[in-house]
Image: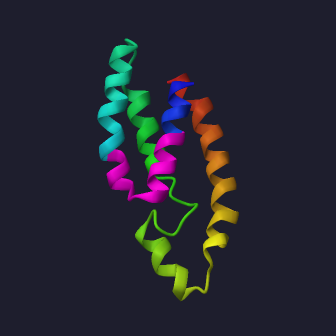
Amino acid sequence: MVLSTFILIMTVLTNVFSNNAAAVIGTPIAISAAQQMDVDPLPFVLAVLFGANMSFATPFGYQTNLLILSAGGYRFSDFLKVGIPLILILWLGFSIVLPLL
């Protein structure tokens, strides 16, 4: 549950801020949480890594999204329509696979 929550928090952060900022904020928190729970920090760092790269729901999360927003004639809602289902699929998949590590 904690890994899944980290993925979700990083996903929300990366859709508002850049993926680099989300990773810089989340990595020390994830390592600290893993150490406090006395488990391997690698899955937690991977949860931050994968969550911080799921910037599909807004054009602000990644530079290329912002570039194609006006050039491609897309609207903000287009990113939400495609990005949210993709994020949910990846979140579910990573939430199942990461604990197996």
Q: Is residue 37 left or right of residue 98?
A: left
Q: Is residue 70 above or below residue 89?
A: below
Q: Is residue 44 above or below residue 22?
A: above
Identify the residue at image location x=45%, y=54%.
14
Q: Is residue 33 above or below residue 61?
A: above
Q: Give residue 11's position: percent from left, percent from top.
A: 51, 48
Q: Give residue 4's position: percent from left, percent from top.
A: 56, 32
Q: Give residue 62's position: percent from left, percent from top.
A: 44, 65
Identify the residue at image location x=44%, y=28%.
43
Q: Give residue 29's position: percent from left, percent from top.
A: 34, 32
Q: Is residue 4 above or below residue 38?
A: below
Residue 58 falls in which quadrant of the image?
bottom right
The count of marks equals 0
Judging depth in this view, the residue of 40 and 58 nearest the camera is: 58
Q: Main secondary structure of the magenta part?
A: helix
The N terminus - image quarter = top right
What segment carries the magenta color?
8-23
Q: Is residue 70 left or right of residue 32?
A: right
Identify the residue at image location x=46%, y=62%.
61
Identify the residue at image location x=51%, y=49%.
12
Residue 20 included in the magenta stretch of the image: yes
Residue 19 included in the magenta stretch of the image: yes
Color style of the picture: rainbow
